[in-house]
Amino acid sequence: MELQRNNLFLHWDQAFEYIRKANPKIKVHGFAVTSFNLMMKYSWFSVDSTTWLKHAAYGNVMVPKYDIAKKKFDYCTPPLIVSVSDVSLYKPSKHPHYSIAFAKEVVERIDQYFHMAGVDLEKLQTSLLERQKVNIYFYEQLLKDEAIHRPSKYKSDQSFF
């Protein structure tokens, strides 16, 4: 698996190096590319996929890890995939709900993040729309964070909800 990942990065390294040399003004779209590592490593103009929808449909949401030292959510590392519904196929524990799967301090940070995302905690377990809101919020904040490579002229200042 690691060899495949290294070969994939080698392929993208070569492609982006070729583009940089040939014409650095070319805008590259990552069709079906929302792998956290790929998004963070390369200067995409835009990316899209249905991963965020599939996570929500299967009862999961993406939550950034919390950096205690910086006292803020960290968008430089891959997010937690948090199970919030009994329809989840991704179960790090035998219980489908995050309040059982994580330590109390982590649950408090997850709840804080859900509050920041403006979702109804009571509806999150049963509402596909509420889970979609959390995942969209994750990507909005990822764009606003300074860690992601993006063209300097692009700024995300609008919200979907």
Image (cartoon, rainbow, N blue to C red):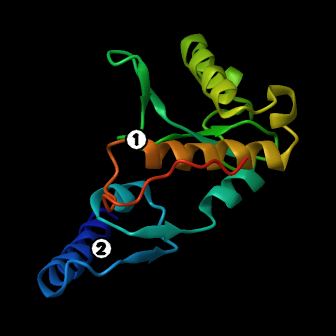
Left or right, 13 with respect to 129, comes to left
Query: What residue is shown with label 1?
Result: 145
Does dot 1 land on a helix, a strand or a loop? loop
Q: Residue placed at 44% from the left, 44% from the top? A: 144
> Whole-percent x and y of residue 76?
35, 41
34 w.r.t. 128: above or below = below
| Nearer to the camera, 140 or 55 | 140
Residue 93's image quarter?
Answer: top right
Q: What element carries label 2?
A: helix
Of residues 117 and 15, the one drawn nearer to the viewer in this rendering: 117
Q: Nearer the viewer, residue 60 or 150?
A: 150
Residue 156 rendering spot, x and y as whole percentages:
50, 52
- Report the residue that reaches farthest toward the top: 104
Tell me which corner region of the image, top left, top right, bottom left or bottom right, holds residue 69: top left
Give the percent coordinates (x, y) of residue 131.
Answer: 74, 44
147 left or right of 117? left
